Amino acid sequence: MHIKQKGDFLVLMEIYRIPPEKPLIHLIKKNDLSYYSAKGVTGFGPNEIANAELFDPGFDENTFWIYSSRSKRMAEFSLQDTNRLSISEFRQPEDMYMIYNMFYTKDTTFIGISANDPHKLIEVDSKGKWINGYGTWEKIPERSDLDDYLLGELNKGWFRANDEKTIFVKASIFRDRIEIFDYQTKEFITVDGPRLELPKFEISGSGANSALIFNPNEPYGHRDVAFGDSYIYDLYGGYNEMQIRQTNEVAKTIFVLTAKGEMVAKLDLDRSVRSISVDESLGKIYGITTDEDPGIAVFEIPKELLDK
């Protein structure tokens, strides 16, 4: 489902519905795309994870972290051994339980997304103590029936950070919106488009049981985000559920942005992928293909883009 990287390795993360005896994470060598090792034992026991939701490279060159939204923990894995169990883990305390995606920062705090919160991002310490909230959901005048939870659902999607944890990006899957958060200035930059209109949806239920039901004919928006040293790479879809089922095409477009939200290039891929990772030093974009026998596609970054 996801492809990321750390050092000389690509890190592939499986969907949680695989058989429980199978590994959730795979390490692939970037130089020759050979298989290196498997990681992740499915479960809720010590050093196990229930799913592999989010990749965090961490700040140790020999390890990486995986966030499990189902077991509410971050697990640290070694790049140097073949042990599938994590070598350490951080379990979310009760005060952090509403956070469902989060990253470590260099300040040893966590920045994440919390359900039913007025803030787009929140920052807490390791005990779950509130430090700050960043950005608030913009109300939609014609949809006064959307509370903070439903606004969060409307803007739900992918949460990514660069390796230095200075730039965080929220990319919506249901609407065409990217929000770039600069951790140093604590400011958001919002990039809308290519579609500017909201997707069609209905509200099901009421109160704490309410949820958004999107029209199945609505195309999905952003499908993943990756970072290079110079640019942000936004994988964009534009296909609805029926089109995806009929063609297996999920996304074939990458918008290349600066950290200020300025678009510098649009890359049209010759095959569909569902997730990407970028190594500008090698001039490569890596993607997980969406055909019947998924593999890793490697694309060349146009030289003129890297020479800018």
Image: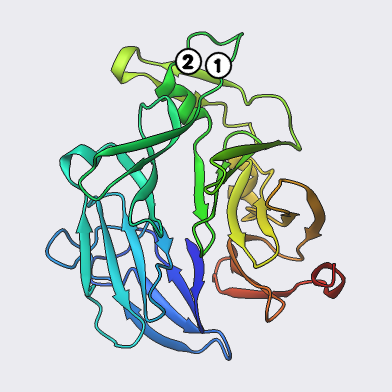
- Crowdedness near tag 1: few (<14), some (14–19) or many (≥20) residues, C-alpha within 10 Å: few
Which residue type carries mark 1? Lys
From the viewer's perspective, is residue 133 above or below residue 74? above
| Picture coordinates of residue 207, whole percent (x, y) | 32, 13
Asked whether the residues under the numbered discs 1 and 2 touch, taking CB atoms below 8 Å apart as contact, a structural biologist would say yes
Query: Which one is closest to the eye, mark 1 or mark 2?
Result: 1
Quarter that holds the C terminus:
bottom right
Question: Which label is found at residue 159?
Answer: none
What residue lies at 42% left-to-right and 66% top-to-bottom? 13
Q: Nearer the viewer, residue 183 or 138?
A: 183
Gap between marks 1 and 2 measured at Cα: 8 Å
- In the image, which disc is placed on residue 139? 1
Q: Amino acid type of disc 2?
A: Leu
284 or 287, nearer to the observer:
284
* Lower position in the chain sequence, tag 1 or tag 2: 1
- Residue at 39% from the left image edge and 59% from the top image edge: 15
Give residue 295's quadrant in the image: bottom right
Q: Which mark is residue 146?
A: 2
Query: Where is residue 154 shown, x and y percent of the image?
Result: 52, 28
